[in-house]
Image (tube, rainbow, N blue to C red):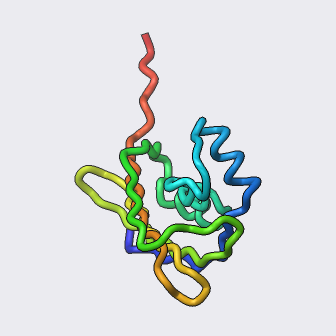
């Protein structure tokens, strides 16, 4: 699969979504949680592209990383660009994303690795 570039998408750090994220992850603290941007990968166009890239293979979460150039602000709007690429050995989908301010300043770079595995076959007795 050749690299697929998506976006930029307008994303926001909405207080209600951040509080729901904190509740689901049982996280505390103030401000925008470091891993909160992972939620933006669930945006419909991004999610569909990920599902299409997986095909009939199951995506297993292998890892993720976040590198911050500056903190995200609560209630702010950002631009998210995503690049999807596939590696062959081992088979995995690599998602690289950048979140920038509307003025183009880099806030966070993130990478997510999804191992792609064939579904288990049912064996008859």
Identity of the residue drawn at 39% across and 47% down: 116
Q: Nearer the viewer, residue 36 or 41?
A: 36
Taking the view exactly as shown, the residue that stands out farthest to the left is: 89
The quarter of the displayed image where residue 124 is located: top left
Q: Nearer the viewer, residue 9 or 27?
A: 27
Total label count?
Answer: 0
Taking the view exactly as shown, the residue that stands out farthest to the bottom is: 103
Give coordinates of residue 27: x percent, y percent: 57, 40
Taking the view exactly as shown, the residue that stands out farthest to the top is: 125
Give coordinates of residue 48: x percent, y percent: 61, 61
Q: Quadrant of the N terminus?
A: bottom left
Identity of the residue drawn at 46% across and 79% down: 106
The quarter of the displayed image where residue 110 is located: bottom left
Identity of the residue drawn at 61% across and 68% down: 73
Q: Quadrant of the C terminus?
A: top left
On the rendered structure, is 93 left or right of 101?
A: left
Compared to residue 117, the image places residue 12 above or below, namely below
Give coordinates of residue 101: x percent, y percent: 57, 81
Taking the view exactly as shown, the residue that stands out farthest to the front is: 30
Identity of the residue drawn at 48% across and 74% down: 107
Give coordinates of residue 15: x percent, y percent: 73, 58
């Amino acid at each position: 699969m050749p690299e697929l570039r998506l976006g930029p998408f307008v994303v926001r750090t909405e207080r209600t979504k951040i509080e729901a994220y904190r509740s689901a992850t049982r996280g505390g603290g103030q401000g925008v949680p470091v891993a909160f941007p992972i939620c933006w990968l669930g945006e419909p166009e991004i999610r569909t592209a990920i599902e299409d890239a997986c095909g009939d293979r199951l995506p297993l979460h292998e890892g993720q990383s976040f590198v911050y150039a500056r903190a995200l602000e609560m209630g702010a709007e950002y631009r998210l660009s995503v690049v999807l690429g596939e590696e062959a050995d081992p088979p995995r989908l690599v998602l690289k994303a950048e979140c920038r301010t509307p003025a183009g300043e880099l806030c966070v770079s993130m990478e997510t690795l999804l191992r792609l595995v064939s579904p288990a076959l049912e064996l008859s007795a």
